[in-house]
Image: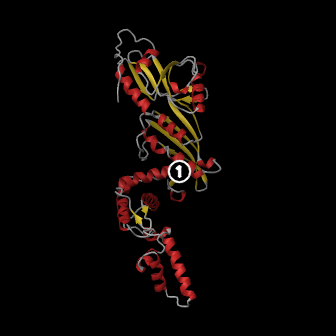
Amino acid sequence: MLPADRIQVRIAGSEAVPVWLGAEDHGWLRALIDDFARLEGLPYREAVRFLQEPPRTPAPAGKRRMAIWTLEAQCVRERPPLDAGALRDALAVEAQIARDAGRFNRAEVLAAGARRLGLSAAAADEHMFADLPGERRLRNPEPPPDPRALAERTNVALAQGLLRLASEVTIEIHGGARSVVRQVRLRRLLCTMRHAEPEGVRLDVSGPFSLFRHTTMYGRALASILPMLPWCERFALTARCMLRGRAVNVHLRPGDPIAAGAQPRAYDSRLEERFARDFARANLDWDLVREPEPVKAGEFLIFPDFAVVHRRDTSKRFLLEIVGFWTPDYLRAKLDRLRAIPHTPLVLCIDRGLNCSAGDLPPHARVVWFEKRIDPSAVLAAIGPAPSGAWQRPPQTIDD
């Protein structure tokens, strides 16, 4: 993510608009990529000095600084081919011996120190300070990015840099919210969730600038959400950021040139994936809907694993939740929230290894116990007999 001194925005009143890179920047981005190719193998300090010179292809200064940072972040600073610290220690010993003898000569000291480590004097002279940051050799990413890819990466780094400066972030998501919520929980972000009409989810996330410490770590966790948002059907993100000494609002929406990250996993586990496949094979009358809309349970939102909906009578609808191996605290919280939706038809598939008692379970839930694998015929039996004329595949063993 871009550091604050590289971020480019246009501020108007209380609003800040990111300065995105687009197709109009591809020409000078190509020239910048070619310049980096010329810097291959040079010490980093020489690369920095070269890049500070006026470019041969005119470019907007602020955009160019963002792109340089992004491309540098993809490069590798090569480790030195020898232990430069040990070499300097050997040279220091030889220098002291020479001084004590009253015959200090740089070439002789260099040759003697090199012999201690089995090196030539030329190699010792070349790599004496090779471990210092400015002396490490620059290696370009392989393969090098094209202008479009560099623009996309720079735009993502810009947006993530802005989130790192946020005191609060609000995200409204319609469609595909579950993967974002999963990431929020995985990264332990401070977040409250509620409904957003119609059938959406609103996430209110505390930003790193609302915390007193660990802001860099938390900022990276918050920025990790960003590449997931383009996979949602629709989203609107508003961040309250501190920029140039003032508080401003930054808005990110579909259509902004933010490249999507890796596609979110379709299923949380192999168990879920296998059950979905088996259920589809086992009957033609009930559809298994992955990641249905969330359900309000008191002050919380529940994101069910599946909804089971009859194809010809959609009023026949059950939420299906898989309760696998979790910590006792997580299991207790999950069951408490499920008990808070007594009027919602619910099927609970519970791993026998959890040793749940009847008193632990929501009284309105239809329970299917399983070991290693969920039997779709047991789920179909739990939701009641099939309507007249319904087709159901006879039970069978389905191997991977």
10 Å neighbourhood of mark 1: few (<14), some, or many (≥20)? many
The answer to whether 40 appears left or right of 291 in the picture is left
Residue 67's x, y, as percent?
Answer: 43, 58
**For the point 39% across and 22% down, which residue is it?**
287
116 shown above or below 105 = above
Q: Pick out the residue farthest to the right.
A: 212
Q: Say which quadrant the C terminus sits in.
A: top left
From the top left corner, tell me how far across and down residue 186 is, in percent: 53, 40
Residue at the image point whose x is 41% and y is 24% from the top: 288
Name the residue tied to disc 1: 162
Residue 15 shows up from this direction: no
Q: Nearer the viewer, residue 205 or 23?
A: 205
Q: Is residue 26 left or right of residue 192?
A: left
Determine the image quadrant of residue 279: top left
Residue at 36% over, 12% down: 390
Residue placed most toward the observer, 20 or 289: 289
Reply above or below: 70 against 96: above
Task: Judge whether residue 88 can be spotted in this image.
Answer: yes
